[in-house]
Image (tube, rainbow, N blue to C red):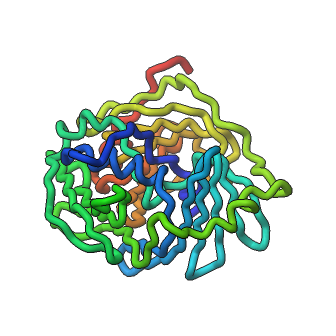
């Protein structure tokens, strides 16, 4: 469905914390820091329902910044390279520079915001020590205090602090989606030969105009407790005739994005709910506007949010 394209820079900015003596909440800070500051390479699997994707990732830290290469190992060949806030995608035999804000949060980078408020909305529990990809990990469980968000379970390497596995669970404790390393090398002799050619000078830049920060006048009245607005922008989106207003809200673990645009009577304007792993998307036309609400929250939450959108500015 076209409406999925370009959605959501959903995950978030982090504070830094030392691993030693970490509390249960500090494990998130530790994982966020380690995901940026650790050399590693490996293979991880992403699963939801009967769908499985396998990818190879390499991440190295140089004096100037960090470099990351992500390669798909099944399905169509695709390669994504990130460096210094820039993103390049190699597909269909072309390297194209793309929107650095596009796409969901990247495993194993966990970038929490608003950590101080997490304990108000989640019960945080240590859930034992388990091995993942041959490494010892501390398991942490984040159980919501309401039924409007998912439970999050993470496995953090006890030495480096790197996130090695993460799962999202529903109210029946069933896995909605999961990321997990199956092979991993941390530090040591991680291959760096690809770094020199990781930012092709002749790559074709994306044609989209930059997003602009705005005060649009759109508001949402029925967000779950703890969700705060982190961004409000006017942005171009692939396949759209006009720029789209986007509001992003986060509770520190999950994010919800609200997209608002004029209705244009095409097939995407039909009301509907779509799910992909832990991400649910609900769209509906209201008063000649198409609302899209997408987030890593249960279906009833995105529906509740959409039904509470209203315009509080001047037409």
Where the N terminus falls, by quadrant? bottom right
Residue drawn at 14 percent across, 61 percent down: 127
Q: Position of residue 188 (x, y in %)?
A: 49, 67
Task: Tell me which corner region of the image, top left, top right, bottom left or bottom right, holds residue 138.
Answer: bottom left
- As drawn, 58 above or below 52: above
Image point (26%, 69%), residue name: 136
Against 315, is 94 above or below? below
- Residue depicted at 66% across the width and 53% down the height: 87
- x, y percent for residue 222: 29, 35
Task: Please state if 194 lies on the left or on the right of 176 as rendered.
Answer: right
Q: Residue at x 61, y 55 (%)?
A: 67
Count of numbered tags: 0
Which residue is most to the top? 314
In the image, 221 versus 125, the foreground residue is: 125
Residue 24 spot, x, y in % from top left: 19, 48
Q: Is residue 20 visible?
A: yes
Q: Position of residue 212 (x, y in %)?
A: 63, 30
Q: Nearer the viewer, residue 150 or 236?
A: 150
Work out whether residue 139 or residue 190 is closer to the camera in this orientation and state it: 190
| Horizontal side, residue 251 vs residue 106: left or right | left
Find residue 94 and report its image quarter.
Answer: bottom right
216 in relation to 184, above or below: above
Residue 156 in sight: no
| Viewport quadrant of the C terminus | top right
306 vs 136, left or right, is: right
Residue at the extreme right of the image, as rendered: 202
């Amino acid at each position: 469905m076209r409406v999925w394209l370009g959605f959501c820079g959903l995950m978030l900015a982090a504070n830094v914390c030392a691993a030693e003596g970490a509390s249960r909440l500090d494990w998130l800070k530790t994982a966020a820091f380690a995901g940026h500051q650790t050399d590693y390479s490996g293979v991880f699997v992403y699963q939801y329902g009967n769908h499985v994707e396998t990818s190879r990732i390499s991440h190295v830290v140089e004096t100037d910044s960090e470099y990351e290469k992500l390669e798909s190992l099944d399905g169509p060949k695709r390669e994504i390279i990130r460096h210094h806030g820039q993103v390049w995608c190699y597909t269909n035999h072309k390297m194209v520079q793309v929107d650095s804000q596009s796409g969901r949060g990247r495993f194993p980078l966990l970038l929490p915001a608003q950590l101080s408020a997490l304990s108000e909305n989640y019960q945080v529990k240590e859930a034992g020590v388990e091995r993942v990809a041959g490494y010892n990990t501390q398991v942490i469980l984040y159980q919501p205090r309401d039924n409007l968000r998912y439970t999050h379970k993470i496995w953090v390497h006890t030495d480096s602090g790197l996130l090695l596995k993460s799962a999202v669970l529903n109210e029946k404790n069933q896995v909605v989606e999961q990321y997990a390393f199956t092979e991993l090398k941390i530090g040591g002799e991680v291959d760096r030969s690809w770094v020199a050619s990781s930012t092709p000078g002749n790559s074709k830049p994306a044609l989209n105009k930059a997003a602009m920060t705005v005060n649009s006048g759109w508001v949402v009245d029925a967000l779950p407790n703890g969700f705060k607005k982190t961004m409000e922008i006017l942005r171009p989106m692939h396949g759209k005739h006009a720029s789209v207003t986007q509001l992003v809200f986060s509770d520190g673990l999950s994010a919800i994005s609200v997209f608002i645009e004029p209705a244009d009577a095409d097939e995407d304007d039909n009301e509907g709910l779509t799910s992909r792993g832990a991400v649910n998307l609900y769209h509906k036309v209201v008063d000649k506007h198409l609302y899209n609400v997408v987030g890593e929250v249960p279906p009833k939450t995105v529906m509740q949010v959409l039904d509470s959108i209203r315009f509080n500015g001047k037409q």
